[in-house]
Amino acid sequence: MTSSLDELADRYVDQMAALDPCLAAMMGIAGQDDRLTDYSPEGDAARADLARTTLAALDKTPTDGSDRERVAAAVLRDRLETEIALHDAGVRDEALDTTDGPVQRLRQAIELLDQGPATRWEPVLARLTALPTALAGLRTSLTAARDRGRVAALRQIRRNIQVCHTAPAYLTDLADRYTRHGGGPLADHLTTAARDAAAALHDFAHHLETDLAPHAPTRDALGRDRYALGVRDNLGTTLDLEDTYAWGWTELARIETAMADEAARIRPGAPVPEVIAALDADPAHRITGADAFRRHIQDLADRAIADLDGTHFTIPEPLRTIDCRIPPVPSGIYYLAPAEDLSRPGTVWWTVPTPDTETITWTVPATMYHEGVPGHHLQLGATTLNTTTLNRFQRTASELHPGHCEGWGLYAERLMDELGYYRDPAHRLGMLAGGQQLRAARVVLDIGLHLQLPIPAGTGFHEGERWTADLGREFLTRHGGAMTPAEIAFEIDRYLGRPGQAIAYKLGERIWLDARDTARRRDGAAFDLKAFHQHALDLGPMGLDRLRAELTRPTP
């Protein structure tokens, strides 16, 4: 029987999806596939009003006294209050960042409809047709914010200009593909819509170059108050930022010591950079061609599911399939949960530079465990399917809780080490160098850059100087794993555009590990790791403060 709280949560999901179809696409919410988000001032105001009216309704909605409804109400309240705080602080005014701004969400909303031969072309046409209007609304918002003296940093504007210049080729190719594969009644309409969408993107890039960039600040650091709001948004917690910054340095040193120990197993006496260079050059750790690499990661994902199901986890049948894909335009490595109606499978997107590129693979297993099983595919997929303990808002809200989600992904990488899955020392070094080291470096950099903190004595790196983007690039060259200069530049721009998100991985992992240790001490010999994981997944996504409290609650 549906409770009053469940009805409120369901209604909010429907209303939120209608007001923000691009976010709904990321969250896997069905029913808005032919629409795009209105990023005009009126659209922003409508989303803020929805958060306020829903919070007011939540204040008046009774719960049944169960733990399930207690948690559900608290999670919804936390998110609504955060959305209101972001709006009131004017965070949406600038509305541009490198990885998750409106331009990126508009592009991704179209990409997500691209399912190869299974593509439904009517929604593609609808979204292509809607793109010029959506960009016009965003332009109005950004211009109004500029007139109030609020403009995104020049670095973020330049990244968005790049997206506007690269995305049109994919849109026109998408329409051409329909024609190449047999065509049909939509061919002319798709061609026209893609052409108009491409022109709108070029016009928007011109607007950014001529109307916003001249007014944009060159200072990237957003400061303590804005950073604290980013931490609340991405992690659902409050932090002692100086203490967390110091912990990041300590954790980085611990990981790099472990890397040296693992490298010595591969090449005794050789320094870590020499070992990494040797692994990069080893033909045994290289695959040529995007298709071959896609098959490689698909095989890794499938084998992990087969191994872990029934042993360390119970994996629902719909999650025993995962779709590994190469995105049509560069967009990093990421996972999207299955749509709530299962019309879209859980999908890992993994960018490779060109179709005939040669990809290094010794770091890949840990990343696949992070994105697939037991990482995001299990966590987010199980959440999507869980109609027993979670209401609809909870089932679709993983995208709103990066600390919970990315923390679990990094925890999954380490868990697979504990379970013995990095039998090849190169793969274990890949877990340390490809994931753990970079995520610890992000804690140092993200906090250091936005607060412009001094670099501590004893670190051996520009001691006493305050962080700048140039120092950040040098730091990642030393401590960021095997990244190219272009990848390092993108990382720095990412941190500076989305404060608090980059630390979600390591800080989230820390909460998962601490909570597990607390539960193990609490339960003693009765502690059951599989049961702990099942309970944790059944709780659904939430902020880290609430997650710690729920996982460490005394047993009845």
Image (tube, rainbow, N blue to C red):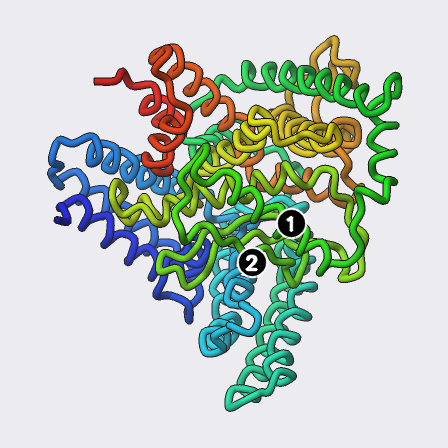
Q: Is residue 232 left or right of residue 214?
A: left
Label 2: element kind: helix
Is residue 39 visible to us here?
no
Q: Position of residue 77 (x, y in %)?
A: 27, 37
| Towards the viewer: 121 or 283 | 283
Q: Residue at x 39, y 44 (%)?
A: 382
Q: Residue at x 53, y 66 (%)?
A: 110
| Figure quadrant of residue 204 | bottom right
Is residue 280 visible to us here?
yes
User: Label 1 vs label 2: CA separation?
Assistant: 29 Å
In this figure, which residue is indicated by the disc labeled 1? 297
Q: Earlier in the sequence, mark 1 or mark 2?
A: 2
| Figure quadrant of residue 517 | top left
Q: Is residue 122 left or right of residue 449?
A: left
In this figure, which residue is indicated by the disc labeled 2? 103
Q: Position of residue 52 (x, y in %)?
A: 26, 45
In the rendered image, the vertical position of residue 505 relative to residue 354, given as above or below? above
| Towards the viewer: 552 or 448 | 552
Q: Is residue 46 left or right of residue 403?
A: left
Q: Residue at x 34, y 15 (%)?
A: 526
Label 1: element kind: helix
Q: Amino acid at mark 2?
A: Val
Which quarter of the image is occupied by the C terminus?
top left
Q: Amino acid at mark 1?
A: Ile
Q: Position of residue 2 (x, y in %)?
A: 15, 49
In the rendered image, the vertical position of residue 550 relative to residue 289, given as above or below? above
